[in-house]
Amino acid sequence: MGSGLPVTVFAHGLGGSSVETRPLAVRTPGTRVLLTFRCHGSSDPIAGGWTYDDLADDLTEVADAFGATGAVGLSLGAGALLRLLSRTPDRFERLAFVLPAALDETRDDLATARLRRLGAALVAGDEEHVVRMLLEEVPPQVRGRGGVRILVDRRARQMLGVTPPYPRGTDAPLPDLAPLSGVTAPALVISQVDDPLHPSAVAGRLADVLPHGELLLLDAGGVFWTETRRVQDALATHLCPAAPETS
């Protein structure tokens, strides 16, 4: 999307594709590169399932191919970005993490149970169940808005059209938080309250441990439903700050 500098790569979440990050990227200046991980979308599978090393490899290869100086990771994509930074903490000049789900601990809670149920429904081809689960992620106050059900139905059909991406084993994005001490890039962390899949406490820890981290905490459902324009503007301002005025 777009052209010119800066070049920013966007990495999506579990079960998503480049379609998922498009709303986040629309107002960011320059060139926006929306990748789809292997095992996701219509991309090729990985025998035995994905690992964070696989995702970090994909993100590195795409970022290097386009000369990206900025990176945005959404949910699982945030984990992939963290694994990449554990290898090369100075790879990017600007960073953003949207709804990070895990840092140095694996997820064995409500979120993983929900993902297992969703995966089972996808394998069974149960569109009604998939739609029902996706609607649970929409804040109650906006579920009745025009277009919401259309978007959810479209998302369900996209997910039903591919094999659910499963991890190869139990893993966390980082072995510990120590590698993040070498990250020099300014980092914006965006989260929302009352999100069991992406606890705001995880985002808070990430913003605190990054040397130049900043937290933007939204109301429930804010990222994609109630405060999307605010998120788009925050990302645009952070990823491409205005050049200083000269006299």
Image (spheres, helix red, strand yellow):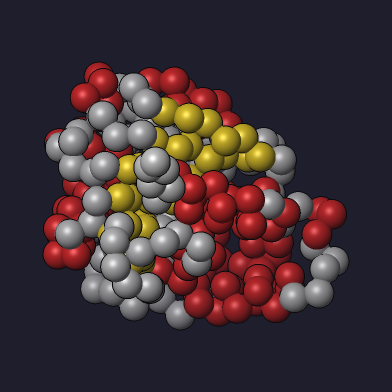
Depth check: 246 or 162 in front? 246
Q: Residue furthest front?
A: 247
Residue 123 at x, y percent in the picture: 47, 70
Which quarter of the figure has residue 171?
top left
At 26% from the left and 21% from the top, the residue drawn is 181
Residue 152: in sight, yes or no? yes
Depth check: 31 or 174 in front? 31
Depth check: 141 or 229 in front? 229
Q: Quadrant of the N terminus?
A: bottom left
**Seen in the image, is 44 located left or right of residue 194?**
left
Rendered view: 140 above or below 45: above
Depth check: 129 or 140 in front? 140
Residue 205 at x, y percent in the picture: 46, 23
Residue 154 at x, y percent in the picture: 60, 78
Which quarter of the figure has residue 40?
bottom left
Which quarter of the figure has residue 157?
bottom right
Rendered view: 127 above or below 180: below
Residue 50: in sight, yes or no? no
